[in-house]
Image (cartoon, helix red, strand yellow):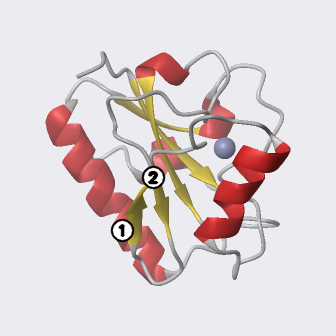
Amino acid sequence: MRDIKYLVIHCTATPRNTSIASIKRYWKNVLGWKNPGYHFIIERDGNVENLLSVDKVSNGVRGYNSKSIHVSYIGGQYSDDRTFEQKQAIETILTVLKSFCPNAEIKGHRDFPNVKKACPQFNVIEEYEHL
Ligand SMILES: [Zn+2]
């Protein structure tokens, strides 16, 4: 297992009905990434897709990826539009990941230095400080 310091929450910043397949195509064809942007992506109905083994490095926050596991919900284009099911799924996956990496800090993408994005459109540190 890698030395994980951060469990990072993102939004895809796409329309709510965006498919995982189209997001993966964008990473590969437009950005030219070999690995996905996130390890886990959460659909509107709360289904969690594992896109990459947590042992591998994904592309969530430049400069911090080697020490991070990235989780994103589909949505967040303009605001925090998570569904009830997505909120539950985020909490569940963070609980599981915390059990494997008890010392990891839970943060939002925007909580890293020099990030100009609103990603993930809500205050992660506050919402999950109980975990
Ligand atoms: Zn992000």
The answer to whether residue 60 shows anywhere in this view is: yes
Residue underneath mark 2: 51
Residue 89's tag is 1
Q: How crowded is mark 2: few (under 14 residues within 10 Å), some or many (20 or more)?
A: some
The x and y percentages for residue 58 are: 53, 33
**Image quadrant where one finds the N terminus:** top left
Q: In this view, does 24 lie above or below 65?
A: below
Q: Where residue 68 is drawn, which disc sits there?
A: none
Residue 63: give x, y in percent of width and height.
Answer: 63, 15
Q: Earlier in the sequence, mark 1 or mark 2?
A: 2
Depicted 104 relative to depicted 22: above or below = above
Residue at the spot x=43%, y=19% of the render? Answer: 67
Q: Within 8 Å: ligand 1 and the Cβ of disc 2?
A: no
> Is 44 placed left or right of 46 in the picture?
right
| Callout 1 crowding tier (Cα within 10 Å): few <14, some 14–19, many ≥20 | many
Element under disc 2: loop
- Do the numbered discs 1 and 2 sit on residues whose CB atoms are within 8 Å? no
Query: Could you tell me which secondary element the residue under label 1 belongs to?
Result: helix
> What is the three-letter code of the residue carrying label 2?
Leu
- Residue ID at (36%, 71%): 88
Relative to 87, does residue 30 appear above or below in the rendering? Answer: above
Residue type pointed to by label 1: Ala
Query: Could one spot residue 75 in this view of the protein?
Result: no
> Ligand 1 lies in which image quarter?
top right
* Up-down relation of residue 77 to residue 51 (above or below): below
Distance from Cα at disc 1 to Cα at disc 2: 16 Å
Residue 3 percent across, percent down from the top left: 30, 15
What residue is shown at x 46% (from left), y 73% (from top)? 86
Is residue 37 left or right of 3 when viewed as pictured? right
Residue 124, horizontal then vertical, whole percent: 51, 47
Residue reaching furthest to the left: 99
Q: Is residue 103 left or right of residue 74?
A: left
